[in-house]
Amino acid sequence: MNGATPGTDDLNGAGFASGAGARAVFPFAALIGQASLQQALLLAAIDPGLGGVLISGPRGTAKSTAARALAEMLPEGQLVNLPLGASEDRLIGTLDIETVLRDGSVRFSPGLLARAHRGVLYVDEVNLLPDALVDALLDAAASGVNTVERDGVSHSHDASFVLIGTMNPEEGELRPQLIDRFGLMVELQNAFEPQVRQAIVKARLAFDHDPGGFRAAYAEQQALYVQRIRAARAALPLLSFDDAVHARVSALCIDAAVDGLRADLVMLRAARALAAFEQADAVTVRHVERVADAVLLHRRRQHDAQRSDQGPQQDGTRPHDNAGSASGDAAASTASSADTDWGYMPPEPAAAVPVKGVIPLDPKKR
């Protein structure tokens, strides 16, 4: 069961710690019951090129708290919020075309993507954003570069950030083409275990009562996270994948019936980031298996009934793959029709009665 440490907004009104003039950040190390979320966020922090993390869950499950906590541990410590009403220009920036025409120089006004460089870009209710904005931020998150083009003039700048998008499934889903482009996904649930629920509330109350003292108790763990993130980023280029790792990734993605190869690539990168964080000498199959759920959660498709009922044979083929006889050909044809037209019933032979003559209709009965 995934619990949640409610954010300041959840339990403390305006979101400011008592007696403080600025927002206090709940420590990443103090999050309770969110191991899967913490792992996904750390992997995205180590390798921002994964494409970010999509967090799905009901209200009050500390999605924004976790995003702020991660941002604090990154080099710039910058958390940039993308509001729902933001325009494309506000997101990617603008070019002053008049300046270009007048004196040939490019005058660029940076947007939120430039501000988020080396930090976290947080998008609450990403499923409610226009598709064009989601496309733009996903492009930048995957490439680490933002390019603005206007009337044949272009400008590019670095935009390496950790993308964190949240959504409440009750308010609608993302289109499949967009959700697939998020590198990792975590699904949060409400905490219904009494001990976990009580621990979360106690931690929240302790933080609200004395933010400084609460943070001091986790200072050593926080410093260790920062150090390990930095070391893991440096170790990424030194880790490679052997054939066993590639084979396991392929098997998991095929079993999940994913579209394309994005899942394979993300899984390999996520496994490498986990190995780097744990200071391992090599990426192993175990690393792959520990990141697989976050990679496949939003990409997994159910196998059709034909493939699930008929498992692979010893030679790796399925029963309808062998067409060595007329009956085999017919079975393959039937299976193919069932795969392409769901619910389609193949034609069946029926007895025919020969007609010896044509009986004219009685004009009076017409």
Image (spheres, rainbow, N blue to C red):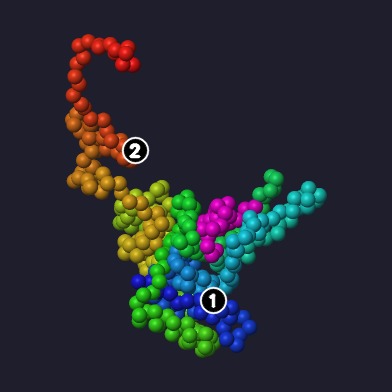
186 vs 9, left or right, is: left
Q: Residue at horizontal 22%, vertical 10%?
A: 357
Q: What is the span of residues highlighted in magenta in the rendered image?
A: 123-148
Of residues 124 and 246, the one drawn nearer to the viewer in this rendering: 124
Q: Residue at horizontal 51%, vertical 79%?
A: 11
Evaluate whether residue 306 shows in this view.
yes
Q: Position of residue 262 (x, y in %)?
A: 43, 52
Q: Give the quarter of the image for residue 363.
A: top left
Of residues 132 and 9, the one drawn nearer to the viewer in this rendering: 9
Which quarter of the figure is the C terminus placed in?
top left
Instruction: Identify the element where label 2 is drawn.
Output: loop
Q: Residue at horizontal 53%, vertical 60%?
A: 126
State yes or no: residue 17 in magenta. Answer: no
In primary-sequence order, the first of circles 2 and 1 is 1
State yes or no: residue 142 in magenta. Answer: yes
160 vs 265, left or right, is: right
For this orientation, the residue located farthest to the front is 364
Q: Give the quarter of the image for residue 360.
A: top left
356 vs 35, left or right, is: left
Labelled pair 2, 1 in contact (Cβ < 8 Å): no
Evaluate whether residue 220 shows in this view.
no
Which quarter of the figure is the N terminus placed in?
bottom left
Going by the numbered disc 2, the residue's amino acid type is Asp
What residue is shown with label 2? 341
Going by the numbered disc 1, the residue's amino acid type is Asp
Q: Is residue 346 above or below residue 95?
A: above
